[in-house]
Image: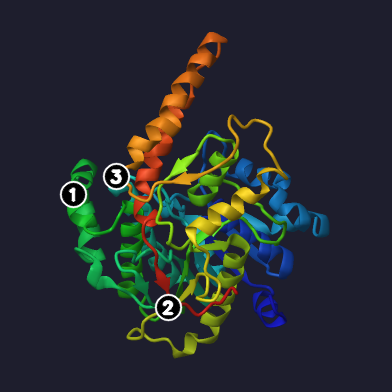
Amino acid sequence: MDDGIQGFYKDKVVFLTGATGFLGKVIIEKLLRTTELKRIYAMMRPKRGKDIQERLAIWQKDPLFEVLLKAKPDALKRIFVIAGDCLDADLGINRSDRKLLVSEVQIVIHGAATVRFNEALHVALAINTRATRLMLQLAKEMQHLEAYLHISTAFSNCVIFRIEEKFYPEHLTCDSNSVLAMSELLSEQMMDKLTPTLVGDFPNTYTYTKALAEDVVLRESGDLPLSVFRPSVIIATHEEPVSGWIDNLYGPIALLYGAGHGVIRLTTFDKDGLASLVPVDYCANAALASICQTSKEKSQRNARSQPAIYTLAPSENNLLGNTDFINHSLIVREDFPLTKMIWYPFMHSVSNPRLFPFAAFFYHTLPGYFYDLALKLTGRKPRLVKLYRSIHANIAVLEHFFHNSWHLRRRARIG
């Protein structure tokens, strides 16, 4: 990050949703380590029996923050937790906290989202779409707002395969105003029954509700100094603050984790397709740079002009094929073998998704029954067949992305 961007963040007050998410944590660490900002208000909700302060305290032991805390032991004291939940009306933020945000915040980063592809529509709508509208309404009250970043995804418009940095409301079956109005009138069960009709050509509720969220931004951002950030598939850190850090298993990382343990030995994808992957530290840098640029251009923004969109994806000169991604990943299997693998790591692919269930029976399910039988005979709980059911269901959910490639026109360049 250059001096100009670091200087921009000096003494700034930032409000961030999605603070405990993968990208959210990396953005917070980057801000605290490389800038002299004044304060971060991080919206969090209690989870799994831990209150919001306990969730923040866990970061003291997270490897992501190790470099930061060695250099600045008190850095996390600049984080102030705001209790909130995107599922709640008015974001679940109490009156006193809302007044605090309105009077102090200069930069808003809205990154909270449910990333489950098969989330029930009423839940995905509340978190990904309605909360976007509520955040915009809150931002319009902020007295010192300099920049607002809406974090979307490069696949919010995945019903087309050449995506430019513009909005595509024409691909929605109904505009965001109509869908949100419908969700207020109908029951949750009725909204979920309407999923096939409303989602239309979108492959899942995640991409659909993120597209709706962009429509909300287009329609309701007004003259806010706002931009949209669209990263492609986010993977582990490249080098900042440590190499290879990730805090969850999803998408391509989950696939490699299963392959490394010898559990997943078969998948289905287009062997000539492209893997559009970007490291999370690159995403954090691009997001923070986008905010700086948005602040510089705020005087040019008016209610009639569309917000700027910034996409982060591999350049045309740095593309990675699906087959190369798998092959490169398996190169390290002999240098870094896992101690609990059940099979020598390899990965075969079935190009035709219709043949995958048949082949998976012999690669996965049948060996799984023998493995579970061995577990039963040794007095342990069988688990592999159940695990394979879950893996195959997830592969089916991701089929649209395994068998298609997108050309993403973007401003940010990563190689």
Q: Mark 3 vs mark 2: give the one in front.
A: 3
**SS class of the residue under badge 2?**
loop
Tell me how the rendering is colored: rainbow
Mark number for residue 354?
Answer: 3
In the depicted structure, whether residue 374 falls above or below residue 191: above
Mark number for residue 224?
Answer: 2
Neighbour tally class for label 3: few under 14, some 14-19, many 20 plus, Cα within 10 Å? few
Q: Is residue 405 left or right of residue 183?
A: right
Query: Which one is earlier in the sequence, the residue at label 1 or at label 3?
Result: 1
Q: Are marks 2 and 1 in contact (CB under 8 Å)?
A: no
- List x then y, in percent, for residue 39: 65, 64
Circle 1 residue = 194
Q: Is residue 101 left or right of residue 340?
A: left
Q: Determine the image quadrant of residue 400.
A: bottom left
Which residue occupies 32% across, 72% down?
220
Camera-side residue of 9 and 207: 207
- Quarter containing the N terminus: bottom right
- List x then y, in percent, for residue 275: 48, 61
